Structures are given as structure tokens and as C-alpha cells.
């Protein structure tokens, strides 16, 4: 049996630019917010390198995690007293919402791609490891930390709790769409949260939407689609992500070759060597990574120095749209020419192909997804939303793809010794339309 830590004598209130106020009345939640592992999220940006595209996007995983907690608190109030909601899961769900992103590393997904880091795995390790978070959770009772982890890793037997935290219509997405739109200064991700919460209902092992709320969900799906292509997958952000990855990959390559850095990157060595312990991981945040980028601007290795300088000073790579039918031939020839002019194509000629679904109805095997958005009809039946909504039916599995090639345009403009190579590079790049990294 678990033992609640009880309520605070006085409710704590966070002022929030998205939800106006975030209320904490549970002693357990208040103690978790105060742990050093949760406070670390103040030093990790929610949108990675997007602040180089949208200058207001400086908000953090700390902000977002509190927001997800607050939406969950409001949603539980909607569910409370309904047949398929058991209030014994209240604290468990609130804790899972609060801690769902605690395992994120610096610059989030761009960082993960270089080192094969999975923030969900690290979230579980933090919840179950030798941490302040684990010690707080253990006060509730033996096995509580494991149950929190099971909600986050989607293995909990009550899948209603899982779909509340992680699905195509979940509290995580609700907060990050609203929050990211607010701080990026765009309107794409803004939807009527109050209305959406009012039309959600608990059901056996899933969360459903009242039939009358269908249009709110249509709006949410379109807002999410627009946010991905206009903000999350903005080509300037993709350029800065690739530049960040190029720096880390170059540093890793130098370390593996025995290169001696001016300042030994002690915090990153466990990542380079894939020997990262929990203590080392928790010591990483964006202030640490930025310190090394600043130092590497003066490194003897010209590639690492140049890439670091570019990131710190926002001198990003330009891009061209990449014709898919010509990709292989163009890249092979460009790589050959880049080598001739002294630019390593592994770091200065970067391909990016993106594909995104506005609503992922079917899995890879063609079967209905495990987490479709379900409508609860007036007669009590449940129907997947695309069966009822012509709009969602039209966009379900309508995949949009975008291919770009990133390169250092100004270096190519300044070439003097390689006039013939420059002309050939220009001709190849004109196969796409060159774009400036601004918006």
C-alpha cells in the first residue's frame, strides 16, 4: 500500500505565461519540484536550437514539465467522479506528468541523435536510480517509483493513464503546442485548451472525446501539423541542429583519434566513450556544452574551431531544396568538389530528409495505430475520428516530405584559388533554390 504525503498547509502557486497560474497542493509534487534532478531542467531549453530561429524560444523543460503537470491536474478534475476514473491514481498520474521529461539532455533531440541517447531511458534511470527523486518517491511506498516509470514507459496495466501522458492526444502535446507557440511568437499552435479538456472522457484503457468535441480535435490536429512545419521543422532550426551535431561529431572523432584538446572535455568524454553513468549524465546541461563550444572556438583543429564559432555567433549554413531524383548524383559530385577545395563534406555538406504525418492512423504493417483518437458517439459507441471527420480522413497518413542540403555559402563565395571548382559547385547547387537562414 502507498501512503500519500498529504497536502501542503498552503497551496503553492507559480505564475505562468501560458496557463496563468499553476497550482501545487500536494506535498509529494512540491518535494519533487525541489529535487536537483528536476531543477536541472531549468538549464535545458524546451526547443533545443530553435532560439536561433525564433529569438523568444528560450523557455525550458522546467517550464514545460510544470505545464504538463497543470493540464493533468485540470484533466483529473474533469475525470473525477466518472465511472472509468479511479481517483487512487491521481498522485501517480500527476507525478508521471511532472517527471515525464526529466531525462532530457542538453539541446534535446539534436544531442540524442549524435550519441544515441534516449531521454525516455534516462528518465527511467533517474526515477529508479540513486537520486533525490527516487528518495522522495520511496516515501510514498515500495514500488511507487517503479509504477511511475511504468506509466512513462507505457507498460502500466491501466493504459488510460498512459494515453493521458503519451498518445496522439495527450497532456504533453497540449502544453508544448501552446507553450512553444507562445514563446516562438506564432499563432499556429494555439487552440482552445479549456474546451478540449471539457470534451475529454475517461474510458476503459484509453481517453476518448465526446462526439460534440470533434471540431476541437480537428483544430488541434491542424494546429499541430502547422507547428511542426512552421516551427519544429523550420529549415533554419534544422541548419542549427545539424551544425550542433557536426560540432559534437567532430569532437568525438578527434577524441577517438587521440587528439589532445586545449581544455580536456571531461564532461563529454563518457559520451564519446559510451560509458555514461547516471551521475555524469545529470552533470550535463547546456551551460556545460556552451562552455566547451566557447573553448573550441580557439582549438588548433580548424574544423572544430570553425564549426564552434559558427554556432556561438549564429553563422549558420545556408540551404537548397534537394531534388530527390538527383540526390545521389549531386551529393557524390559535390562531396568530390568539397574535398578538392579543402572542406570535409562530412561536416560541411549535410543532407536532411524529413517526413511528417499530421495524424498517424496506421502503423508500418497497415493496421490501425494503437493510439488513434477515438470519439465517443451519442449512442455510446466509440469510433476512430477519421471515420466521422471528413477533414481528418483527408489528412490521415497524408505524408509530407522535405529534402534539403546545408552548406557554408559564404566560404564558396570567397573562393579564389578554385574558380573552376566554385563554378561547378554553383551549377550543382542551382539545381535547388538557395535560401538565406533567416525568416
Image: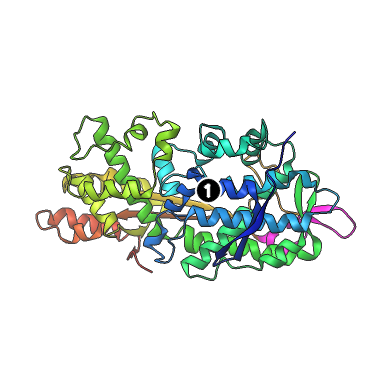
The residue under label 1 is 34
Left of 272 or right of it: where is 229?
right
Q: Is residue 202 visible?
A: yes
Relative to 355, say whether 195 is above or below.
Answer: below
**Start and end of the magenta stretch?**
375-394
Residue 391 magenta: yes
Q: Residue 397 location, x and y as percent?
A: 63, 53
Question: Which residue is at 18% across, 34% downward?
Answer: 260
Residue 41 is covered by the magenta coloring? no
The residue most toward the right is 379
Q: In the image shown, does 103 or 390 lie closer to the viewer?
A: 103
Q: Is residue 341 above or below residue 117?
A: below
Drawn side of residue 147 relative to residue 110, left or right:
right
x, y percent for residue 268 = 33, 37
- The residue shown at (27%, 41%) is 250
Q: Is residue 429 left or right of residue 73?
A: left
Amino acid at each position: 500500500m502507498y501512503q500519500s504525503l498529504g497536502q501542503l498547509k498552503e497551496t503553492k502557486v507559480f505564475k505562468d505565461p501560458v496557463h496563468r497560474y499553476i497550482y501545487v497542493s500536494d506535498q509529494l509534487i512540491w518535494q519533487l519540484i525541489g529535487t536537483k534532478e528536476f531543477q536541472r531542467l531549468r538549464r535545458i531549453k524546451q526547443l533545443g536550437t530553435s532560439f536561433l530561429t525564433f529569438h523568444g524560444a528560450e523557455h525550458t523543460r522546467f517550464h514545460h514539465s510544470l505545464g504538463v503537470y497543470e493540464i493533468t491536474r485540470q484533466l483529473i478534475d474533469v475525470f473525477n467522479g466518472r465511472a472509468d476514473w479511479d481517483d487512487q491514481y491521481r498522485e501517480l498520474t500527476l507525478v508521471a506528468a511532472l517527471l515525464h521529461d526529466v531525462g532530457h539532455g542538453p539541446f534535446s533531440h539534436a544531442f540524442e541523435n549524435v550519441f544515441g541517447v534516449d531521454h525516455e531511458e534516462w528518465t527511467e534511470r533517474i526515477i529508479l536510480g540513486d537520486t533525490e527523486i527516487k528518495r522522495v518517491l520511496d516515501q510514498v511506498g515500495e514500488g511507487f517509483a517503479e509504477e511511475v516509470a511504468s506509466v512513462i514507459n507505457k507498460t502500466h496495466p491501466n493504459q488510460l493513464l498512459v494515453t493521458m501522458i503519451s498518445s496522439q492526444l495527450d497532456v504533453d502535446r497540449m502544453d508544448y503546442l501552446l507553450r512553444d507557440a507562445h514563446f516562438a511568437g506564432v499563432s499556429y499552435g494555439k487552440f482552445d485548451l479549456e474546451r478540449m479538456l471539457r470534451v475529454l472522457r475517461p474510458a476503459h484503457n484509453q481517453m476518448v472525446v465526446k462526439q460534440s468535441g470533434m471540431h476541437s480535435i480537428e483544430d488541434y490536429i491542424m494546429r499541430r501539423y502547422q507547428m511542426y512545419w512552421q516551427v519544429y521543422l523550420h529549415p533554419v532550426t534544422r541548419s542549427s541542429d545539424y551544425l550542433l551535431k557536426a560540432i559534437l561529431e567532430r569532437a568525438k572523432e578527434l577524441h577517438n583519434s587521440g587528439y589532445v584538446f586545449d581544455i580536456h572535455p571531461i564532461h563529454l568524454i563518457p559520451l564519446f566513450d559510451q560509458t555514461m553513468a547516471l551521475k555524469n549524465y545529470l552533470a550535463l546541461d547546456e551551460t556545460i556544452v556552451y562552455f566547451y563550444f566557447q573553448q573550441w572556438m580557439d582549438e588548433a583543429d580548424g574544423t572544430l574551431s570553425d564549426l564552434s564559432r559558427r554556432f556561438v555567433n549564429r553563422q549558420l549554413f545556408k540551404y537548397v531544396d534537394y531534388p530527390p531524383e538527383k540526390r545521389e548524383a549531386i551529393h557524390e559530385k559535390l562531396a568530390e568538389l568539397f574535398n578538392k577545395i579543402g572542406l570535409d563534406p562530412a561536416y560541411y555538406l549535410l543532407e536532411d530528409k524529413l517526413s511528417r504525418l499530421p495524424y498517424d492512423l496506421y502503423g508500418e504493417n497497415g493496421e490501425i495505430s494503437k493510439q488513434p483518437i477515438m470519439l465517443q458517439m451519442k449512442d455510446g459507441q466509440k469510433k476512430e475520428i477519421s471515420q466521422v471527420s471528413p477533414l481528418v480522413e483527408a489528412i490521415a497518413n497524408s505524408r509530407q516530405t522535405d529534402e534539403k542540403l546545408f552548406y557554408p555559402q559564404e566560404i564558396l563565395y570567397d573562393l579564389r584559388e578554385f574558380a573552376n571548382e566554385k563554378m561547378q559547385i554553383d551549377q550543382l547547387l542551382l539545381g535547388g533554390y538557395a535560401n538565406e537562414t533567416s525568416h
